[in-house]
Amino acid sequence: VPESAFSPLALLGVGYIGGSVALAARAAGLARRVVGYDVDPRVTVLACSRGVLDEAATTPEAAVEGAALVVLAAPVAGLAPLAQRIAAAVAGRALVIDVGSVKAPVVAAVEAALPAGRFVGCHPIAGTERSGVGAADAGLFRGRTCFVCPGPRAAPEAVAAATAFWEALGSQVLRLAPEPHDAVMAAVSHLPHVAAFALAASLTEQLPQLEAQGAAGAPTTSLRDTTRIAASSPPVWRDILLANRQHLLPLLRALEGRLGQISAAIAAGDAGALEAVLAAGRAARDRLVKGS
Amino acid sequence: VPESAFSPLALLGVGYIGGSVALAARAAGLARRVVGYDVDPRVTVLACSRGVLDEAATTPEAAVEGAALVVLAAPVAGLAPLAQRIAAAVAGRALVIDVGSVKAPVVAAVEAALPAGRFVGCHPIAGTERSGVGAADAGLFRGRTCFVCPGPRAAPEAVAAATAFWEALGSQVLRLAPEPHDAVMAAVSHLPHVAAFALAASLTEQLPQLEAQGAAGAPTTSLRDTTRIAASSPPVWRDILLANRQHLLPLLRALEGRLGQISAAIAAGDAGALEAVLAAGRAARDRLVKGS
C-alpha cells in the first residue's frame, strides 16, 4: 500500500479520536493534507488553529471531494446519515473507514449507503475518558490494539489498506467479524461504562455532605478508578449503548442480578452468600485482567 | 509523645495493612520490637522471615503482654472478639488502635471491651486491592490521609498519641467522629467496592468466550480500572460491607435505581432519558474527583 493511498485525508467528525487519527496520520507521513468537517463549525476552526486540519469544509460532501481516505469519526448514531450524505461525492478510489465503538449495525448501514467494497469498519481500542479535539494526541494509537471488522461487502484490497493504515499508526491490528466484536466490547467496555456512570450518578445526593467534609477533595483511589470513565462524553456513550443494546442488555441484567444478590445478602446479614458473590467477582477479575 | 511510647508494638492480625504498619513503625524508629499474632500460624512464620515481626506469639494475650502499642489489624468482624480476649492482658499504659474501614460499630464494641480510655479508632486511607503480609509496604502511609475517630470514652492523651503515631508514619491525620466517617466511607469506598465486585462477577459467564478471543489478555483500560478493587480480599470486604450496612444499604438502593434507569432507557430506546443519567454521572464524577 503506497503512502499516497491515504492523502488527502477527509475527517468527518472532529473530536478526540478523529483528531488523534488526523494528527497520527500526519506524524506518520501518511497525510500531507487533512480536510475536516464537523457539525459544530467552531470545532473545525479550533482544529485548524491546532494543526489538526489544513482546511475546514462546510459540508461533508465538500470534505470528501478528492479524498483518498475518508475517516468517519462522528458519534455512532451519526455514521449512517453521514455515509448517505457523502455516497455520491466519494471518489472511486477512496477508502472509507470509521472509528466507532459498535460495529455490526454501523457496518451494515454504512456498507448499504456507500459504493460497494469501499468501507471497512474499524475500532481502535485507544480511548480514554477525554473528549474534544483539544485532547487529540498524535501518539494515541501507538502500541494499542485496533479491531478491523470488515462486513461482507468489503473489498480485500480495502481491508488490506485499512490494516496497513492502522499498522503505520503503530497499532496492532486484530481482525474480528462485527458481531463477535460487539459481544466482546459489550463485556469489556460498554458494561464497565454503564457501571461507572451509574455509580457516580448514585452518589449525587451525597455530594453536598462529601464536599462539606472535604472528602471530595481527597477521594479514595477506589472512587477515582471505578468512576474514571464516568468522565466520558454522555452523548457519545448514549449512542454506543443504544447501538449495542442487543449484546449489552443481557449483561446489564446480569449486573443488576449480582447487585441484587449483594444487596439481599447485606440486608439479611448473610455473610456466606455475600462472600460467595465477592469471591465470584475476584475470580472473574483475576481471569479478565491477567497479571495485575 | 516520646518515641518509646510505641515500643514494644503488638500486632494482632498480620496482613497487608497490619504488616505495613509494623514495617512503617520500624522504619520510622518507633518500634524497636514487634510481636505478632495471627489466627493462621503460617502467616506469623512468614512475617518473621520477612522482618515484619521479631516474634510470633501463639495467643493474642501473649502478644500484648508488656506492649506499649497494640494494633488491632484483623478483619473488621474479628476486632471486638480480639479486644475481649486481650482486655485483661493489656498493660495499663498501653495505647490500643485499630485500622478498620468501619468505625462506629467497631469503636463502640472495642471501647466497651477494653479498659476505659485506652482505645482510639483509626482508619488509614491507604489500602489497595492487594492483600496478605507478603504485600506489606513500609511506605504505604506516607503522604496519605489517616482518619482518627475517637469514641466518647477515648482519653485525650490517647488521641494525641494515636495522632502522633500516624503523623510519624507520614500520614496527614483528619479527626472525624465514627458515624460521619462511616457515612463518607460508604460513599467513597464501600459502594465502589460493591460496584466493582458486582461488575466483575456479572461477566463470569462471558469468561470462556472472552478468553477464547484473546480479549482477556489485552483488556481495555475501562475494564482494568473499573474492576481493579474487585481483586481485593473477599472475607475482608464481606466484613466491611456487613459492618457498615446501615450507611451502605441506602446507597446500594440508589445504585440499583440508577442501573434500572439506564436499563429501562436502553430497552425503550429512549436516548434522552439515557443521556440524562449519563450526564448526572459525569457531573457527579467531576465534583467527586476534582481536577482529573
Image (cartoon, coloured by chain):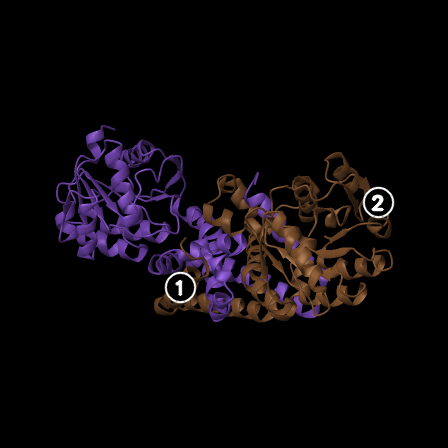
Chain colours: A brown, B purple
Which numbered disc, 1 or 2, marks the residue closer to the eye? 2
Amino acid type at image mark 1:
Ala
User: Sequence order check: which comes first, mark 1 or mark 2?
Assistant: 2
> For the C terminus of chain B, which image quadrant?
top right
Residue B276 appearing in the image: no
Q: Residue A92 appears at what percent x and percent y?
A: 82, 58
Can you name the residue that lies furthest to the top here?
A: B2
Local packing at callout 2 (Cα closer than 10 Å; few below 14, some 14-19, many 20+) is: many
Position of A48 with respect to B212 (left or right) is right
Residue at x-position 54% and y-position 42%: A211
Amino acid type at image mark 2:
Ala
Of residues A94 and A111, the one nearer the viewer is: A94
Kind of element beneath mark 2: loop
Q: Chain of mark 2?
A: A
Q: Residue A143 appears at what percent x and percent y?
A: 54, 48
Q: Chain of mark 1?
A: A
The image quadrant that residue A86 belongs to is bottom right
Name the residue beneath numbered marker 1: A283
Position of B59 with respect to A23 (left or right) is left
Name the residue beneath numbered marker 2: A57
Residue at x-position 31% and y-position 42%: B137
